[in-house]
Amino acid sequence: MVSANDVQRLFLQGIFSRSILSFKHAQVLWEKCIDAVKVANPTLDIRFSDKREDWDLFVISINNSLNCLDLEFRHLTDEQTGREIYAMVNSKDDEIAQMATDYTPVEIAYFKAVVEQIMLAPHEAYSVSSLLALREVNSLKTNMTKAQAEIVLGSFVAKGWLLKSRRGRYSLSTRTLLELLPYLKNSYSEECLECVICYEIVTRGVACSTQNCKARLHYHCCRKYRSRNAKCPACSQDWPQDPKNMTPVGEEAIKDGQDEGRRVRRKSTEDGSDEEDEEEMEVEPSQPLQTQTQSQRKDMDVDDDEDEEDEDEAPQQTQGNGRRRTTRTR
């Protein structure tokens, strides 16, 4: 007999068939599930509500049901569009293992190496060139060739784990930020920046140009804040009239050729000092590695009418070169 609990079951089936979806799309899916259950059993008194508090209660009930499976229906604001995005993610402690169902251990290790270069990018660029991404194969003790790495990189982009810009630079996607956020915060605590408005991670946005001010904002958060306040929320200094004159965070913060050197994190020694990890020597691969074939997964279902106003283009700014990413000084 069809019951009200079948709404949750149908909703989960719809979520599992999608990699990532917007808040509006998730609400439509919820409404359709309710309609389907009511058609099967007209005696049920269940109604769809577009109120935010009712949606939040439904998500809580979903996550309570998923706890035993170490899964979570998690949300995050897309840094580029400002839309709220949802995805089913693995909530286990070893967050990087969430890709294990799709990729081999070697490919996961390669993804982890590329993520590290993105997180350690200089000038808060949070992106890596195609050349540097391919060079990361040399840091792995495997037989993966650069040709095979190029195929795997394409798979990361096709399946929504990485974004590739027109400049050929790779950066973290919303899906990766959703699923690997605990891992990123634990492994790169100093590199993880937080928006002073929404308090979510920032890898694309703007920074206050005032010297030593640590204010970072997403583009969409900056636009909303600037509509009612022209002063920095952290240092209270006046901001430029044109947001394009602010310091960029993300790909626009770096020029081509500024990040060609491989970056490594510092590790603490027994005497309390920091020393830089040694760079791996390039090893020529001897045998081919069977890599995963590219299988295009459906992109995020977002209707055209959901699109918000176009994002402001981040400004180009010349910055000094450096092998390691450091906090800006102004």
Image: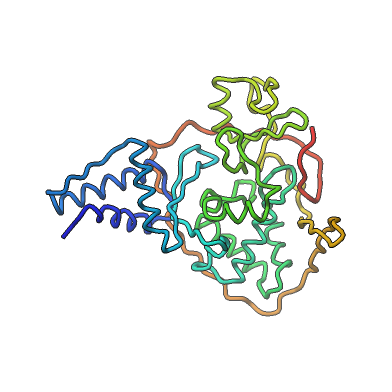
Residue visible at 54% across and 21% down in the picture: 227
Q: Position of residue 38 (x, y in %)?
A: 17, 49
Residue shown at the point (65%, 34%) measured from the top left: 206
Q: Position of residue 188 (x, y in %)?
A: 68, 52
Say if residue 1 shows up in the picture: yes
Q: Position of residue 197 (x, y in %)?
A: 57, 32
Name above or below for residue 215 compared with residue 109. Answer: above
Total numbered labels placed on residues in the image: 0
271 relative position to 222: left or right: right
Pinpoint residue 248: horizontal percent, then vertical percent. Answer: 67, 35
Query: Is residue 227 left or right of 25 when viewed as pictured?
Result: right
Judged left or right of residue 282, residue 62 is left
Rendered residue at 12%/49% (across/down): 43
Q: Quadrant location of the N terminus?
A: bottom left
Identify which residue, 144 or 1, lies in the foreground: 1
The quarter of the picture where residue 226 lies is top right
Q: Nearer the viewer, residue 64 or 80?
A: 64
Q: Is residue 86 left or right of residue 268?
A: left
